[in-house]
Image (cartoon, grey):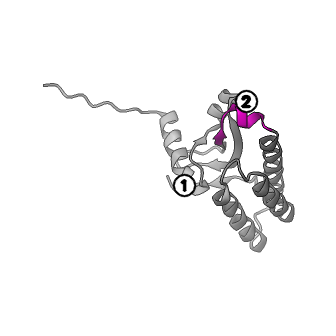
Amino acid sequence: DQRFDYSVLGDAVNLASRLEGQSKNYGIDVVLGEDVATRVGDDFALIELDLITVKGKSEALHIFALLGDKDMAASAQFKNFANLHAAMLLAYRAQNWDEAEHLMAKSQQASRGLATLDDLYDLYASRIALFKETPPPADWDGVFVATSK
C-alpha cells in the first residue's frame, strides 16, 4: 500500500558517478578516487591514472585504476610496471614528451600479463601528440578537465 522512494545524495555519490563515467575513457573497469585509494593502501594493485577535474568540481584529484589483488601488488612484475608507469606520469606532467613516450612503451610492455592498458596508453599517446603540436602553457599543471559525466 505504501511506496517508498529511496535515493542516495551527496558529494561522494556525485564523485563516484563521475569516476564511473571516466572508466570508459581510460579503458579501465574500476576507477578509484584519492580517498578510496589511500584507504585501501597496499591491499590492492593500484596505479595512478591521471590528475583530473571532473564535471561539477573545481579542484583536481588524482584518480587510480584497480588492477588486481594484494598478491598482484606484491609481485615483482607489478612493482616494476608501477614504477615505470609512475615515471611516465612524471615525465608527462613535466612536459618531457619524448621521455614520456619512451616510458609509456616500457610501461605497456611491463604490464603484459597483468592488465590490458592499451586504451589508457592510447589516450596518453594522443594527448602527447596534441601537446607536441600545440604545447600547453608554461604554467600547465598536468590537470585534465573532464567535460563529460
Examine the rendering and report whether any part of residue 139 can be seen.
Answer: no
Q: Please say whether residue 116 is visible from this viewpoint.
A: yes
Q: Quadrant of residue 131?
A: bottom right
Expressed as whole percent of the image width and height from the top left, the position of residue 57 reads 56, 44
Residue at mark 2: 42
Q: Which residue is mark 1?
A: 24
* Residue drawn at point x = 74 percent, y = 70 percent: 129
Between 147 and 30, the one nearer to me in the picture? 30
Please identify the quadrant where the N terminus is shown: top left
- Residue 111: percent from the left, percent from the top? 74, 51
Left or right, 138 with respect to 7, comes to right
Q: Is residue 62 above or below residue 71?
A: below
Q: Residue at x 70, y 64 (%)?
A: 127
Looking at the picture, tell me which residue is in the foreground, 47 or 56: 47
How far from the left and from the top, in percent, is residue 112?
A: 73, 53
Task: Decide which of tag 2 and tag 1 comes sooner along the chain.
Answer: 1
Residue 30 occupies which quadrant of the picture? top right
Q: Quadrant of residue 4?
A: top left
In this picture, which residue range is highlighted in magenta? Answer: 66-75
Q: How many marks?
A: 2
Q: Residues within 10 Å of mark 1 (few under 14, many from 20)?
A: some
Is residue 73 part of the magenta span, yes or no? yes
